[in-house]
Amino acid sequence: MSNGQPDKEVTITLNGSGLPVPSVDPVEVKKDNQKVRWCADFPFTIRFDGGAGTFTSSPNGDGCANRAQSNTFGEIKRYKYTIIANNQENDPEVDVKP
C-alpha cells in the first residue's frame, strides 16, 4: 500500500567512460511503502545484493525508453545494488527509512 508516498524515480545515464550512473545515490525510500523506478535511454539490469531481487528493464512509453521497478523494501537498512549497462557495472545504494 502506498499510503500517499510516491515511488522514487531514478534516471540512469552513462558518464564519459560509459559507466551507468544513477541521478540519486543513495535513493531514500520508506519501509514497506515506496518502490524505486529506474529509467534510462538504454537497456539495463538492476541486481540487489543479498537476494533482494534482480530487475531487467523493459521498453516503456510514458517518456521513458527503458524502465525497471523494484518491490517495496521490508527492512530498515541500506541495500547495495548493481546497475549493469553498456557492459559495465556500478554499485549505488537504496537507504530504507522507517
Image: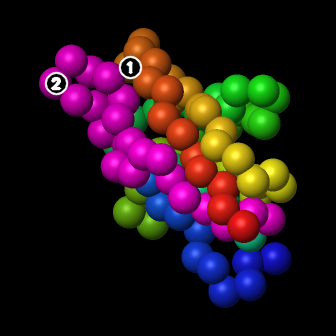
The verdict on residue 22 being magenta is: yes
Please name the amino acid that badge 1 sits on. Answer: Asn
Residue 83 in the image: above or below residue 74: above
Q: Foreground residue, 79 or 22?
A: 79
Magenta extent: 11-32
The local secondary structure at tag 1 comes to loop
Residue 65 seen from this side = no
Distance from Cα at disc 1 to Cα at disc 2: 12 Å
Which residue is most to the bottom? 4
Q: Which residue is depicted at the point 81% across and 29% down?
A: 51
Hey, which quadrant is residue 28 in on the image?
A: bottom right
* Rendering coords of residue 98 (x, y %): 72, 67
Position of the N terminus, as image quadrant, is bottom right
Residue 95 in the image: above or below residue 14: below
Which residue is most to the top? 87
Horizontal placement of 66 versus 46: left or right?
A: left
The local secondary structure at tag 2 comes to loop
Q: Which residue is mark 2?
A: 16
Horizontal placement of 49 versus 16: left or right?
A: right
Please name the amino acid that badge 2 sits on. Answer: Gly
Which badge, 1 or 2, comes first in the chain's sequence?
Answer: 2
Q: Foreground residue, 12 or 48?
A: 48
* Rendering coords of residue 72 (x, y %): 76, 58
Residue 42's disc is none
Residue 76 in the image: above or below residue 25: below
Q: Which residue is depicted at the point 73% across and 78% down?
A: 2
Q: Which residue is depicted at the point 36% across and 29% down?
A: 20
Q: Which residue is mark 1?
A: 86
